[in-house]
Amino acid sequence: MKITKAKRSWLLLALLLILSSFPNTSFSQTPNGTINLGILETFEGYTGAGAITNGAGATWTGDAGTNIGVISGFGAPPFFVGNTYNANAVTAQSRFDLFRLYIHLNDLFVDYPATHAPAFGSGEVLTPGVYSIPGAGSIGTVLTLDGGGDPNAFFVIKFYGAMTVGAGATINLINGTQSCNVFFIADGAISVAASANLKGTLFSKLGAVGLGAGATLEGRMLTLEGALVVGVGATVSPPSCTSSIPIFCEDNCSAAPAVDVLGVLSNYALYTDLGAVANTGTSGIDGNIGTNSGAISGFGSSIVIGSSHAADASTIQANIDLNNAYNLLMALPNTVPSDAGVLPVVLLSHAAAFGNLTPGGEIINAGIYFINSAGSLGGTLVLDGQNNPDAIFVFKFAGAFSVAAQAKMILINGARRCNIFWIGGAGVPTGAISMGAGAVLKGTFLSHGGACGSGASVFLSGRQLSTGGAINTYSGMIYNNPACVTSFPIEPPLPIELLSFTGECNNQNIVFKWITATENNNDYFSIEQSIDGLNWENIRNIPGAGNSTSEITYSFIDFDRYDDISYYRLKQTDFDGHTKVYSPISVKKCFEMNDLLSIVPNPAIDLININYDGDIDQVLSTSIYDVFGKLVYFQKGYFSTIPVENIQEGIYYLHLVLESGIIVRKFCLNNKN
């Protein structure tokens, strides 16, 4: 067969492409930072939308917050040490930081793609790395994470489904592994059974995170949307270390000159010239959303870092830029044509299907790929930039382009998302693009004249564009800018500046006094009482001043109190429902300060003698109550002797009601001897 000069050139190029497909691979995204939780660093638990419930007797250390939901079950130290945040600036910023954290954790290179069974534990020992399970998974009995002596070793275990932890399951960290470098990520709910002992952060994308009774967690509970529940007697606390997991983040990805064609569209994550932009479920979108002719809907509960545009100046320019981008990309000379099925062109071409299911996937080099038909992507596709940051990958399909569920793209050796374009309908009137559920993708997806949709939980580092069709997302993560978290753990402005809170006896009653220097958004104070320092009861609400910059003195008199030690604390509530509890104080046996009343004998058998050294004419009534508050004896006026032989033995309280207050004395009745 005669080989022409042109064919000889193509053959030489083909051989070079083949030889260059076996380089020493390296990550295209060289780490330039470490995992940063931002404002969430002080949190033990956070949900973007959902209730937070702390069970009876559970110990919670660290802040708790929800942007939408009710927070309940949080008392005072030692059972709760931290602050609660509800629907305020802190929880709003927390959603953005959590979204970015999710991006960076999912951007990590997967060391173990579907090579581990869905079940972890049973005494196994794992080496560091990122593990990916294509469905639901579990942890049972004992799982050991061995850092191999490296204090920066990290473990990220991802489940494309729910995650369950069996009763009594234990996670052991050895040889340098630290809980701050351990993350369990589930696409669905995370459920931990009773008495489990876990190390690491539990992160549900969309689902509840629940700990069973008596469980222990050294880590955090996080979810973009779902309830957080801590069972009775459980113990939760954040890691004592700061994560050192290396990540890649940048403020912008500058395209190579040949594909620097987007113009204003570089700021968009979702855009269409003609059609609706719709979302289902809770998605995360980093970038603008726009349509030049259509409606934008369904993003109300989603996390959107950007603005929405419908038929405004921005979309008019985007319309111009998108059509220009399509024309410029189509004008790029094709370097890898369709598979013609004959030599030598077969060495230079590519079939309509990209990717494969082998462990390493299919590796391809930079080029302008043209497929003269519809095309597809399945399994894993590795884009090798061959250490050229301007390596470009443009894929043109003269028809529709479909991505299989859980397909994956990996970028190595300098390949960058801003230099990658997938075009459906190239050179033909229309070509829809569809991305299957759970796919992990890179680059700009541009449908010419058709819809561009991503299925449930698609993770796309790029954007979805269309010159004339609908844009759809479904609980996906679409971002064109994996920026590092830039916020920091902060304390919101104190609602009040409390100068003092005291309680003392005065005229047989406890008088409370507290002084504020400033007040901000202060709705009211609550006085809470306890006889054991653990269980608290609200006894009075006192209106606050709202906003004040001057010193204000408050007071309250408690007429109904115990004779023994009693604990009191001050609780403050904002107009937005945020609360802060201040340290409790104790008042010890108030009435010993004024020893006017005594009871003899004590314990008593058949009668008690009441000795009152005050003005008897001031006594309004004499009564006896049991420990449950039930009245067992009552007489108007003062009586020095009271028969008690018909009263059951036990502990009782004598109430002497005066015109100026009440004196209470405890005595014991032992009339069965």
Image (cartoon, rainbow, N blue to C red):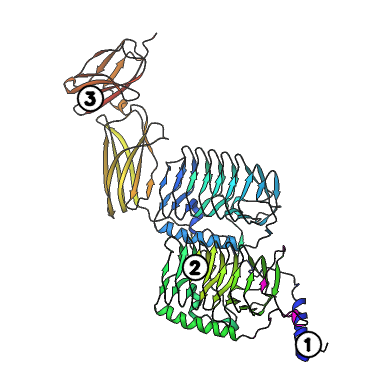
Secondary structure mostly seen in the magenta stretch = loop
**What residue appears at the point 67 percent right and 71 percent down from the top-left corner?**
354
Q: Nearer the viewer, residue 372 or 142?
A: 372
Above or below for 505 versus 108 = above
The residue beneath circle 3 is: 657
Circle count: 3
Numbered circle sitting on residue 472: 2
Q: Which residues are magenta?
A: 333-359
- Disc 2 crowd rating (10 Å Cα; few below 14, some 14-19, many 20+) is many
Separation of marks 1 and 3 at Cα, in angstroms:
113 Å
Q: Position of residue 119 (x, y in %)?
A: 66, 48
Q: Secondary structure at mark 2?
A: strand
Q: Secondary structure at mark 3?
A: strand
Q: Position of residue 434 (x, y in %)?
A: 56, 69
Q: From the viewer's perspective, is 170 left or right of 448?
A: right
Farthest-out residue, left: 617
- Under mark 3, the amino acid is Val
Q: Secondary structure at mark 1?
A: helix
- Disc 1 crowd rating (10 Å Cα; few below 14, some 14-19, many 20+) is few
Q: Position of residue 646 (x, y in %)?
A: 31, 11
Q: CB atoms at circles 1 and 2 under 8 Å apart?
A: no
Q: Is residue 250 visible?
A: no
Separation of marks 1 and 2 at Cα, in angstroms:
46 Å
Numbered circle sitting on residue 8: 1
- Under mark 2, the amino acid is Asn
**What residue appears at the point 65 percent right and 41 percent down from the top-left corner?**
141
- Under mark 1, the amino acid is Arg
**What residue appears at the point 43 percent right and 64 percent down from the top-left corner?**
298
Query: Which numbered mark, 2 or 3, is in the foreground of this view?
Result: 2
